[in-house]
Image: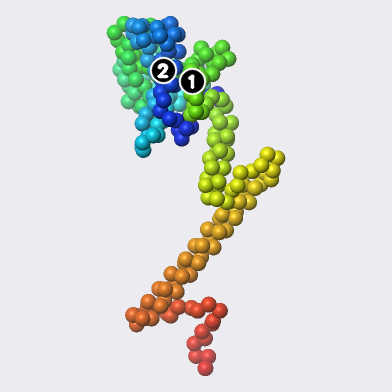
Amino acid sequence: MQTVFVNPERCIGCLQCEIACAVEHSSSGELALSFLEIPVPRKRVHVEAGPVPTTAYPNKCRHCDPAPCQRVCPTGAITREGDLVLVDAKRCIGCAMCAVVCPFDVVTFYPLAGGLAPEAPVAVKCDGCEARVGRGETPACVESCKVGALVYGDINELVKSGRLRESGSVLAATGFAPTALPNGDPLAGWRSFGAARTAADAIGSRVWERRRRQSGANASIDGSDQAPPVKDNVTIEEGAR
């Protein structure tokens, strides 16, 4: 399955993907002329502010299968063609049922060229740049992204590369995973992870032992009925003598 994959940690909120998307879906296909068109071309990707400053997230249609928007559309304006869920502007009546059920809030409503009426808002969502992909090109948002926040390819391969990248980042951050040299040990990452796990377990054991001894000492001072702490390398045999 070919799709656009989002790496949110790389997004810098430059909005280049939004502009490229709108221009791609304009009648002129030109940046300078698209803003003069009536109706104005609309973006299909939405860059939202992240939970903390300087972070952002490019939100777009996931082309679900099965797609909730397709199931609730009363006019059949939303259909599936291969891996894409598409909207036929000529059949959309703007009832917004698709927006109600969309779990990702990516369906917006604006007048479009080719709609039922010039002023009538219709559902607007990502169409996967079907025409561009058909010509062997990448989607406009991916082509315009300069930081790799949006990438295009087979979903399993993209997920795999992202998983490997994040695993390496986590291990390197712990200080136990030096950067592997080309043609180096392919198991270096796993060995370093094991070393980190062993070190963490050892620290946890020492902390637990220290707290257990302290708890026993406090119990003896308070005169409680709890057993005294067990001393290292000493076995206390009750009634031995």
From the viewer's perspective, is residue 169 above or below residue 96? below
List x then y, in percent, for residue 105.
Answer: 36, 27
- Estimate the x, y position of residue 212 in percent, counting from the top left: 44, 71
Marking on residue 19: 2
**Quadrant of the image occupied by residue 225:** bottom left
Relative vertical location of residue 108 with respect to residue 147 in this rendering, above or below: above
Q: Which of 75 and 241 is in front in this view?
A: 241
Looking at the image, residue 199 lies above or below residue 132: below
Residue 93 visible within the image: no
Given residues 109 and 6, the one toward you in this image is 6
Q: Residue at x 50, y 28 (%)?
A: 147
Residue located at (58% from left, 15% from top): 136
Up-down: is 95 above or below 7?
A: above
**Kind of element beneath mark 2:** helix
Question: Extreme left residue here?
Answer: 119
User: Residue 24's x, y, as percent?
Assistant: 45, 13
- Dot 1 surroundings within 10 Å: few (below 14), some, or many (20 or more)? some
In the rendered structure, which amino acid carries the disc numbered 2?
Ile
Q: Which mark is residue 144?
A: 1
Q: Which of 234 and 71 is in front in this view?
A: 234
Q: Where is residue 179 in the image (x, y as percent from the top left)?
A: 61, 44
Which comes before the other along the chain, label 2 or label 1? Answer: 2
Q: Quadrant of residue 123?
A: top left
* 29 vs 60, nearest the viewer: 29
The answer to which quarter of the image holds residue 26 is top left
Q: Are marks 2 and 1 in contact (CB under 8 Å)?
A: yes
Cα separation, mark 2 vs mark 1, equals: 9 Å
Amino acid at pointer 1 = Ser
Q: Which residue lies furthest to the right in this view?
A: 183
